[in-house]
Amino acid sequence: MRQPIRTTCAYCGVGCGISATPTGPRTVEIKGDEAHPANRGRLCSKGTHLGETVELTGRLLHPMIGTKRVGWDKALDLVAKRFADTIARHGPDSVAFYVSGQLLTEDYFVANKLMKGFIGSANIDTNSRLCMSSAVAGHNRAFGEDIVPASYDDLDAADLIVLVGSNTAWCHPIVYQRIQAARAERGTKLVVIDPRRTETCEGADLHLPLKPGTDVALMNGLLAWMDAQGLTDRGYLDAHVQTPDGFWEKLAQGHDLWTTAKTCDVSPAQFQQFFELFAATPRTVTLFSQGVNQSIRGTDQVNAIINLHLATGRIGKPGAAPFSITGQPNAMGGREVGGLASTLAAHMDFASENVARVGRFWAAPTMASKPGLKAVDLFRAIGEGRIKALWVMATNPAVSLPDAARVREALERCPFVVVSDVMAATDTGAYAHVRLPAAAWGEKDGTVTNSDRTISRQRPFMALPEQAKPDWWIIKEVAQRMGWRSAFAYQRPADIWREHARLTAYQNGGQRLLDLADHATIGNDAYEAMEPFRWGGQHPFADGRFSTPDRRARLVPVTQMEVQAPLGAWPLTLNTGRYRDQWHTMTRTGLSAKLARHREEPLVEVHPADALTLGLAAGDLARVTTAQGDSVFRVALSDGQRPGDIFTPIHWTDQTSTGGRTGMLPRPLVDPHSGQPGFKSTPARLSKV
Ligand code: SF4
């Protein structure tokens, strides 16, 4: 047996360390890495069964032009030529990359550099737009930088943990285990705020099943109540926070406990209990996830949470912080290199001095000077013919974007589509003119950043099969063929890591917390041996200095928008989310028979009262219809649903079933600040098939 290799899980943003011991060319024994700070040896079901997903079933192993297998040179030459020709004829904004939180930081960096520094457009967006971009926008508004001011250690130190819009027990299981361990050891209180009564609520002291979309009202109501009790920290606010004129006066109007309870459709007694618990426990961590972010008012919901923490001084201290937990393994690394269309690089925005600074650093010939198109708008532009060449990397937008039928029409119309993926048959790959075989987990080599800013190595423990290549190599080969040979002359991931680290520190002047100067000259051996480390320190902002020009945080006034009442044709509200044992579009977890046992088919969860009205029984087939499309699901009755709300899972695709196609259903409406789609509240109806 070979030696164990220390690597990082392929799935969620908890970022668990894994000890992988190869037992053959394509077999491996998986254990939790006892030394990794994120999981201390523990793994959830998905991580535990990673070994069943490393075989070559379904892999894309050769470059393909149409249905013809070709060599790398031919495929790369064609991609470079078509992108260069399109840019020459129609300008840099006529091309786009749509990338992924599955990419490693090094992959992300090269893609971002090529698009923003050399092609000269910011039309590179990522599927992380669907996951946490509202948190990014909220952090930037409040802190002046996209910082998660918390770590998993804060869960051990908190006296109260509030989970908002997160089925943590299923979606971030190791975080949930850590919370439960803290409860057992220290008596930490747990409150869950979620319209659904999920498995997460089973281990909680209190569940507040608020009406979907009323999070701002709840957080404003709590803040107004705290202020009325004299429990806000005016000393902290005076010293460290900029408060807009009239903030408190406006907050005092219409945010009394009774009005708040009515708006949120939760009993006043439950709110009283929560408010008093919050007041009594200064060591509070508020974890939030997709239920907050995936909303057309997601950024305001994030800032409502951050306002609460700033105004009560619950930030920058052990056990006190707002804590965004990300869905993907490297959403955070992508944020750090600037892999969103709305950010430039290294936590910089498109301010002219930043554009000039990054341009100098890269010696870039054509810097993008303004934000690019965010995911939903980007695919709309493809459908309208404004984008004529698209490169999709490690993601499946034909399934995962809202209004997926329109996304497919856009892909169909796009003159040139490139897909880099590990799988041969994906719903998006069906529209590709060129498919490029990418390295998979276990073959990839680079770094990822988890939800608490811990950077860990993903290390290879298997050889690259057939013609598969790392994403960074594919991108740099295209860049070099487009004429930028020396700027993309990377030999190994460590070359890219050093350049990323140098850029974070380049003329930073201490303004941004993201500063990896210590890694700017790291040797190849040290990179190989890199231990997990957390950038930004244990408690960012502990000194009360933020990343804004005046070093003060911002209270952001946020107002509860009216929640649309169900309309006659659409009497139900559709919420979407994940299952415990599946990941995204099941390209990897679908290979494990053991994982499939948890939920063998996609279910629509319906409150029993609604099912009675609709003449539905458990096990029936029912069609969910929205203004965007329809799909058939098996009915499951659940009194954890609020009456009027239904829930479907996101995972099933053309490759896995004929029904259960959630992506066809949500509206392509987005948050105005972040561009994140609102997946959680689509008007819908349900009918027996
Ligand atoms: Fe992997 Fe997330 Fe499970 Fe950890 S909690 S083993 S990172 S899927």
Image: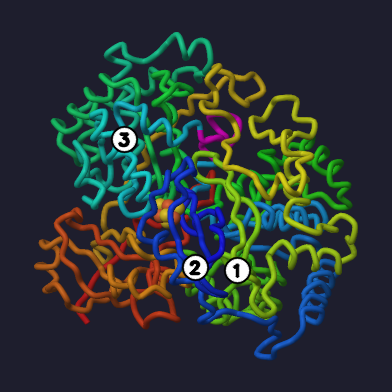
Q: Nearer the viewer, residue 138 or 600?
A: 600
In the figure, 346 relative to 669: above or below?
above
Q: Is residue 672 magenta?
A: no
Magenta-drawn segment: 137-148
Per the image, the residue denoted by label 2 is: 28
- Horizontally, residue 618 falls left or right of residue 592, namely left
Badges 2 and 1: C-beta atoms under 8 Å apart? yes
| Residue at image location 77% in from the left, 39% down from the top | 520
Q: Residues within 10 Å of mark 3 (few under 14, many from 20)?
A: many
- Tell me, for residue 359, which label it has, or none: none
Q: CA distance from mark 1 to mark 3?
A: 41 Å
Q: Is residue 138 magenta?
A: yes
Tag 1's secondary structure? Answer: loop
Per the image, the residue denoted by label 3 is: 162
| Residue at image location 79% in from the left, 63% down from the top | 476
Badges 1 and 3: C-beta atoms under 8 Å apart? no
- x and y percent of residue 629 in the render? 39, 74
In the figure, 265 relative to 27: above or below?
above
- Viewport quadrant of the C terminus: bottom left
**Foreground disc of the pair 1, 3:** 1
Per the image, the residue denoted by label 1 is: 462
Q: Amino acid at mark 3?
A: Val
